[in-house]
Image (tube, rainbow, N blue to C red):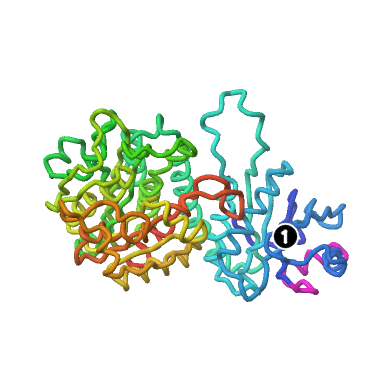
Amino acid sequence: MQINVRHGDVTQAQTPALVVNLFQGVTRPGGATGAADHALGGAISQLIRDGEIKGKAGEITLIHTLGKMPAARVVVAGLGPAEKFDAQVVRQVCGDVVRYLRRRGIKQAVTIAHGAGIGGLGAKASGQAIAEGAILGLYRFRHHFSNAGNGEPEGELEELTTLDRDAARVPDLEAGVRVGQVMAEATCLARDMVNHPANVMTPTEMAQVAERVAQGSGLEFRALDRPQMAELGMGALLGVAQGSQEPPKLIVLEYVGDPANPSNNLGLLGKGITFDSGGLSLKTPEGMERMKGDMAGGAAVIAAMQIIAKLQPRINVTGLVTATENMPSGTAQRPGDVVRAMNGKTIEVVNTDAEGRLVLADAICYARRLGLTRLVDVATLTGAMVTTLGKACTGLMSNNQALAEQVIVAGRNSGEQFWQLPMLEEYKELIRSDVADMKNSGGRQAGSITAAWLLVQFAGDVPWVHLDIAGTATAERDKGHLVKGPTGAPARTLAQLAVNLAGV
């Protein structure tokens, strides 16, 4: 979809649909909505008095102009309460509205710059949120339909123009739209990767996607194969991989934004289990098809690296993705096996379905070998996280409060929510092993926290944040800028973190 910005009067916009907005509780619309209301002879005000338009979040009202203004239709989108308004509201409103327009076969539309006037939102933030909401809200995955498909989809919304009567705001709106497009397009890439079935999105294909991203954005790329991992002593990662015929890959993407200061760096680590059967600790058949998405953390890291390369913050960022399958076979690791990670620490494997922390353990070791001084890992790690936090926010655990808060702030910027869980010493006792340095599962108690306690053994004193996206990696229905299926979270937050750390 093409997104434009231009200066102009909404009452003179020639378009199939003009999108305006209304805060909840407003009885006399002002600004651009007030101008449209006046051109319509007070139709919006009358609908407010009739109780048909309330301005509630998610409310959409279509008004046919019948020649009273050049726009054929006016769409009034509810913003909800003014005191709760922020860029996230704009993302959600735009996502809902573009799908509404698509269902009606509308291919071009004009929207006001939500919040950039009386809403108090900066023009750049408004432009970014509009672009993100529109592109992410229109996302759908149809790669594996035949030519006949499953019925023809609705026609796409091809063009969205943001119109502002204040010419001074146009450059900032344009800058925001450019950033929003970069953020959203990469997030859609992550969604595509998670949507692909495991027979397509293999570890090898995941590495090839990363290589294409590198070629298209100027990143350095390499992928370590099984012999290289073995030479490095990555026994935890290779223990998971040994049950699959698919060769594992350790994907490395490097962005050098501050070559004069190599210590100004950030490591982004993603779990890339392209299919998780549970190994010999086999999962139940119900819902196992969804385990193609156990590489969502790795997909988010690849997408974040694409964003970072295009936004070019002054910081050095390395993305690491451990890509492999977790399969049962005659060569699979067994419950009771002991594996040795790259740093020499040993792990008793009491549950082969607790594999994500094993592959990330070696990724963290490798990140430290590369000299990375701040680490953020992302993984669909534990079902316990879905039980704890549901799908509203991502669980966050850390050994460094400053970095944890920086991630939370980046999430606030991007509209993604995080909740920090305690890393109390008492939880560490649950992964104590009688035969190795630790065991890979502490059982049902505090399952997400004990998984993080295993990982922190490898991070040591390097500032580290663990993000468990088991809940937030997918959405159950279309709402705002999220659509049913993979969300691409937290790619935008990871990229925003790099931008924030760089101070640009």
- Residue visible at 44% across and 45% down? 190
Query: In the image, is 376 to the left or to the right of 388?
Result: left
Q: In the rendered image, which quarter contains the N terminus?
A: top right
Q: Characterize the local packing of mark 1: few (<14), some (14-19) or many (20 or more) Cα atoms within 10 angstroms.
A: many
Q: Position of residue 305 (x, y in %)?
A: 35, 51
- Residue visible at 28% across and 49% down? 320
Residue 278: say if magenta: no
Q: Nearer the viewer, residue 7 or 15?
A: 15
Residue 461 visible to an observer of this rendering = yes
Q: Position of residue 72 (x, y in %)?
A: 80, 51
Residue 33: say if magenta: yes
Residue 316 visible to an observer of this rendering = no
What span is in magenta? Answer: 25-42
Query: In the image, is 13 to the left or to the right of 52?
Result: left
Locate residue 121: give its quadrant.
bottom right
* Up/down of 472 relative to 155, above or below: below
What residue is shown with label 1? 59
Q: Position of residue 52 (x, y in %)?
A: 83, 62
